[in-house]
Amino acid sequence: MGMAEIKPRNIKFALTGEDKRNWFAGNPVATAIMDGASILFPVGETFFIESVVYYKDRIADPKLQAEVLAFQQQEGIHSREHRRYNKAIEAFGGDVPALEQRLKDEIKKLEAAGTSPEYKLALTCAFEHFTAMLADDLLAHPDFMAGAEPEFSKLWHWHAIEEAEHKAVAYDVWNLVGPKGLKGYLMRARAMWKATRVFMGQSTYNAAGLLKARGEGGYGRNMWKMLHFILVRPGVLRRSFPAYLSYFKPGFHPWQHDNQHLIDKFKSAYEA
Ligand SMILES: [Fe+2]
Ligand SMILES: [Fe+2]
């Protein structure tokens, strides 16, 4: 069961207006990587909500029921704000609808293949582990976004806090309704492998597309710079690798990594 209070914060971020291209400390590659991930959120989070809410009648525990509702509200607002974010960054260059279409197509393929609600929930748990892991990394390294435009930084920290708060909701539903034993473990592991390929593949593809549209050169030139950012310095994924592997432990639960103190450290900035 989740430990943190899951509190939807209905905030509208002021991202439009001035030209904030290279909002990430003047670094086009870092900016494109974050923007490339942002493009995935509205479609992705809608899928997460649907996958979890599908099971709401199976949940008898009022605490988990309330958590599912709060999860749905948080992801709904994230989706709305990332849609606004994505509209704003289109002005910096990049065909956002075309990039977003790739994730829509991936979901259409799942539907066409008759994917079970259980596997969709397993995929959601895997993606939620990804977002929780990246959120933890952001909150644990306050220098990561030093020099970034404050409103973009504020949005990403807000999203990170809420991803940390609700990181176990999909997983607790999975533990309740998903297949048990080896079958459950294998489905969960298979879903993580799929989620890894989709998340890594699409976010780097998006980032490369944005960089090209922003006059920063093609895929070849930027691939090394992106890998450097992801794996070397600051090396977000390198730092997160142990957390990634922990997902494959039988008996894994998101709150085995307790980062409540990070949530508490940042959330006061968003109190109304
Ligand atoms: Fe979210
Ligand atoms: Fe989430």
Image (cartoon, rainbow, N blue to C red):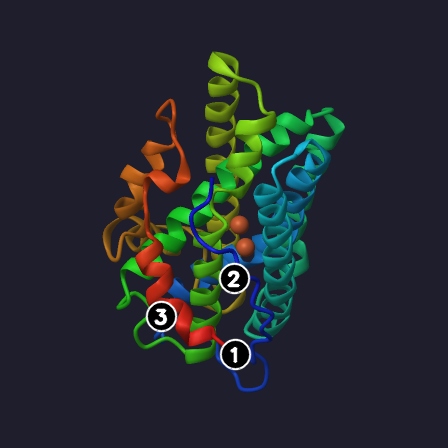
Q: Residue at x 27, y 61 (%)?
A: 141
Q: Can I make out residue 95 in this image?
A: no
Which comes sooner in the sequence, label 2 or label 1?
2
Q: Is residue 187 left or right of residue 265?
A: right
Residue receiving disc 2: 210
Say what amino acid the circle numbered 3 marks. Answer: Asn
Q: Residue at x 51, y 36 (%)?
A: 171
Q: Is label 3 in a helix, a strand or a loop?
A: loop
Residue receiving disc 3: 27
Q: Is label 1 in a helix, a strand or a loop?
A: loop
How many marks overall?
Answer: 3
Q: Is residue 23 left or right of residue 236?
A: right
Say what amino acid the circle numbered 2 marks. Answer: Leu
| Residue 160 sits above or below residue 49 on the image | below
Q: Residue at x 38, y 42 (%)?
A: 255
Q: Residue at x 55, y 78 (%)?
A: 15
In which quadrant of the rendered view does residue 22 lie?
A: bottom left
Measuring from the top left, give residue 201's x and y in whole percent.
Answer: 49, 42
| Residue 228 sits above or below residue 8 on the image | above
Q: Which dot marks residue 76? A: none
Which comes sooner in the sequence, label 3 or label 2?
3
Measuring from the top left, give residue 107's x and y in whole percent.
Answer: 68, 38
Q: Nearer the viewer, residue 115 or 234?
A: 115
Residue receiving disc 1: 272
